[in-house]
Image (cartoon, grey):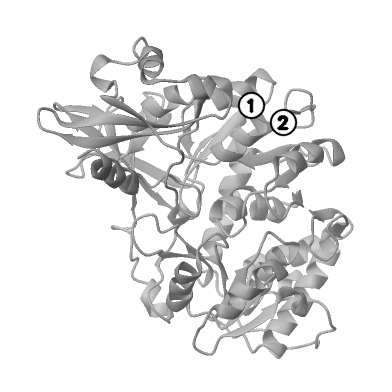
Amino acid sequence: MFDQESSLIAARFAQLAQTRGAQPAMTFRGDERKPDHTFAYDFGKFWRRVERVTAHLQASWGVQSGERVAWLGFNHELQLVTLVACARLGAIFMPLNFRLALPELQQVMDDGQPRLLLHDSAHQAVASALQGQRLQTTHHDSLIATAAPRGLPLPQVHSDQALLLAYTSGTTGRPKGAVHTQAALLANARASHWAHAFVPGDKVLSTLPVFHVGGLCIQTLPALLAGIEVVLHPRFDATAWLDELAASRPTLSLLVPATLRALLEHPRWESTSLQSLRGVIAGSSTVPLAYLQALHARGVPAGQVYGSTETGPISIVLRLPDAMARMGSAGWPQPEAEVKLVDSLGREVGPGQTGEVCIRAANLMCGYWQGDGEASIAAGLGLQDGWFHSGDLGQRAPDGCITIVGRSKDMVISGGENIYPAEIENLLVSLPGVAECAVVGLPDARWGEVPVAVLVRSPDALGQALGEDAVLAHLQPRIARFKLPRRVVFMDSLPKSALGKVQKPALQAELIRTNP
C-alpha cells in the first residue's frame, strides 16, 4: 500500500495504517455536530478518511497539483486528514487564521488564491463573504459525508513540492505566506522527534490553533507521523485542558504564555493532578520565568521551542531533561539546524555577546508566496543565501545554549546602553497585581530613548492598589539603574495582533499621542 504513494508524507500514513492499523491515532472532542461526543480514530480509519477526502477533492472539486485548499474553522480532525490528502495530490494546504477580521482574511485570500475554501459552521458567514477567482466554498463535512469514487489516478508528487502555505500574523504590514515543502515538514517532524524524544505510549494533548505552525508543527503533525496518539480540542479552554488530564492522561502538551497564565489562574490548578505529564513545551521565544517556576514547582519540566512561521518552526530547543537547569533559555539548535548570531554588519559575535539569530535548516520555508505559480516561491524570497534572519536578539553561552533577549526592533538604546525589554517584562509579570505588561522605548532629548513600562492591572485588590512606586521598588534591586523604566503607565488593555502578540509600534504611537 504505502510503496504506491509517491508523497513521502502520505506514504508514512499509509504505512502506519498497514503496520499499526488498530493503534489509536487521534481522539477528537468538541465537534460542532456532537459537542459532548468523542470521536476516536485508529491509524487504519484515519487513512481511510484520507482516501475518501482525496477522492472528493479530486473528483467533486477538481483540485489539482499546485492548487491551494484553504481551511477556515476551529481545530478539527478533518483538518489533519485534509492536509494529508493534499500531500497525495500535490496540492497546497492553506490554513486561515479565524481570528482575523474579514478585510484581513480577504488580503490573505487575494494573495494565496485558493481553489477551494473549506469551513465549519461557526465561520460559514465569513467564508461566504470571502471572494476569489474560481473560488469554491463548502462545509468540510462534504469531504467525508458521502462515498467517494475509487481508483482515481494520483499525480506524481516530489518531496520538494509545496504542501503548506502558512501566513504570518501581519503585525507589521500585510501578512506574508511562508511556503513549506513536503521535505521540510518531514525534516521538522524529525526535529520534533528529537525535541520531545517520543516514546511508545506517549499521548499529545493539542489545543492551540492548528492554523498556525506552532499548533500544527511543533507537536501535532510530528506526533502523528511518529505513530503517537493526538488528543485534539477545537480550541484552548483551561477547564477542558485540566479535565483532559484525568480523562485521557496525556504525557505531553504545548502551551504559550497566555494559555499558561490561564491555567495558573484557574481555581483548579493546584488541585488537579499533573502526574500523567512527563513535560510541557512552551512555544514562544520568551516565557515569563514565574510561569516556568510554577510548572516546575508541580514537578512538570517546561521545555521550550524557539522558531517562527518561516522556520518550520522547530529551530532551537530546550529539551525536557535540561528544562529546570537552564530555565529561561531557548536551548540548543536542533540537529539539522545551523544557528549563528550576527551583529549589524553581519559578523558573527562571540559567546556572551548579543547578536541577531539567523537560522539555516532543512525545515525552513522555501520562500514567501508571491502570486500564483511555483516559480514565485523558488527564489527563496525572505531568505539571504539560505539563511533566515529572525529579527530576534540572542546570546550564546560557552556550551552553546542560546538565550533570546528580545527583538532587534524593540531594543531600547538609552545613553549608549542597550536595554532589552524582555528582561524587564519578565520581572514585571512576576509582580502581584500585574495582569499584562510591555516595555517600549520612547524618544528622549537627553538620552535618545528611555524605557517606559505599560501595565494592565489584575482585577483583584492587589491589582487595583498597584501604583508606580511599587512597580519601581520591585525592579530596583533586580536590574541595573539605567534599565529602570522612566515612566510607568497603566492601561486597561494592550493593543494586540490576531495571534495575541502585543503590537509595540501601536503602543508606542499611542503613548506619544497621549504624552508627546
Q: Say if residue 11 shows up in the picture.
A: no
Q: 297 left or right of 406? A: right
Which residue has dot 2 on it? 278
**Residue 39 in picture, x, y percent from top left:** 86, 59
> Does residue 420 lie above or below 233 as drawn?
above
Q: Position of residue 317 (x, y in %)?
A: 51, 37
Q: Which of 185 and 410 is in front in this view?
A: 410
Please give the name of the residue rendered at 50% of the width and 48% of the height, measured from the top-left corner.
500
Q: Whole-percent x and y of residue 159?
A: 55, 69
Q: Residue at x 69, y 50 (%)?
A: 223
Relative to 482, say whether 4 is above or below.
Answer: below
Q: Name the residue under label 1.
A: 301
Mark 2 residue type: Arg
Residue 285 horizontal/vertical position (percent): 45, 39
Q: Is residue 498 visible?
A: yes
* Quadrant in which the C terminus appears: top left
Query: In this picture, is 84 found above or below 344?
Result: below
Q: Which of the 4 image quarters holds residue 38?
A: bottom right
In the rendered view of the protein, which quadrant contains the N terminus? bottom right
In contact (CB < 8 Å): disc 1 and disc 2: yes
What amino acid is at disc 1? Pro
Residue 417: assigned label: none
Q: What is the distance, in whole Å, between disc 1 and disc 2 at their CAs?
A: 7 Å
Q: Nearer the viewer, residue 82 or 103?
A: 103
Bin the neighbour count of mark 2 within 10 Å (Cα to Cα): few under 14, some 14-19, many 20 and up. Answer: some
Q: Which residue is drawn at 48% across and 75% down?
A: 109
220 vs 144, left or right, is: left
> Quadrant location of residue 424?
top left
